[in-house]
Image: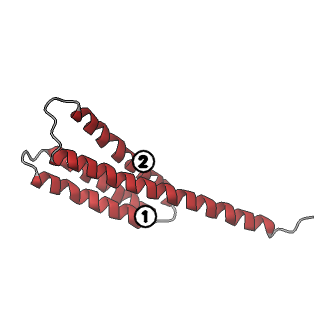
């Protein structure tokens, strides 16, 4: 799962400059996806070490959840304004949210799979012990 976190992080990191340079206003807020991307890359790199894997991947999942909630909240608020147009900025916000949502769903699946495997391993370990 660590390489997947790094991959999503790279995509989000690249999304920021793309939005910035394609935008007419070139607002620094276009780099928000890049900040989330860098955080995912760091978490993914830490998760490559077995010692840090669990905590790093949970941290990456939190970054992913925030990457869904915060941009969508911003978009919902902006859409209530009179001058709202669904343009590049709104599209970038939706893209970031969808990327993060995909990542979070993959994390949840992975966490469930790890838990099932752990329980199965524990059950096999207990059945190997002779009973008195």
Estimate the x, y position of residue 94 in percent, counting from the top left: 27, 48
* Mark 2 crowd level (few <14, some 14–19, many ≥20, 10 Å Cα): some
Q: Residue furthest right?
A: 132
What residue did someone put label 1 on?
Answer: 2
Residue at x 42%, y 47% (from the top left corner): 62
Q: Is residue 7 left or right of residue 129?
A: left
Residue 127 to residue 36: above or below = below
Q: Secondary structure at mark 1?
A: helix
Whether residue 35 sits left or right of residue 51 in the image: it is left
Q: Residue at x 13, y 32 (%)?
A: 83
Q: Which mark is residue 130?
A: none
Gap in angstroms between the C-alphas marked 2 and 1: 14 Å
| Image quadrant containing the N terminus | bottom left
Which one is in front, 10 or 78? 78
In this view, the residue in front, 96 or 30, is: 96
Q: Quadrant of the C terminus?
A: bottom right
Question: Residue 38's x, y, as percent?
Answer: 30, 56
Check the image and report above or below for 116 versus 98: below
Q: Residues within 10 Å of mark 1 (few under 14, many from 20)?
A: many
Residue designated by label 2 = 62
Residue at 68% x, 66% y: name it: 121
Where is residue 28? Give x, y as percent: 15, 45
Can see residue 11?
A: yes
Location of residue 83 with respect to 90 vertically, above or below: above
């Amino acid at each position: 799962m660590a390489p997947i976190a790094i991959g999503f992080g790279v995509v989000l990191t690249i999304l920021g400059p793309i939005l910035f340079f394609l935008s007419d206003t070139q607002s620094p807020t276009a780099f928000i996806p890049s900040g989330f991307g860098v955080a995912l890359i760091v978490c993914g790199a830490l998760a490559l070490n077995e010692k840090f894997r669990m905590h790093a991947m949970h941290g990456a999942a939190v970054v992913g959840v925030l990457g869904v909630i915060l941009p969508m909240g911003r978009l919902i608020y902006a859409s209530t304004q009179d001058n709202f147009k669904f343009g590049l900025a709104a599209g970038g916000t939706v893209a970031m949210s969808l990327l993060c949502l995909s990542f979070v769903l993959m994390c949840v699946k992975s966490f469930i799979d790890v838990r099932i495997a752990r329980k199965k391993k524990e059950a096999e370990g207990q059945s190997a012990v002779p009973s008195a």
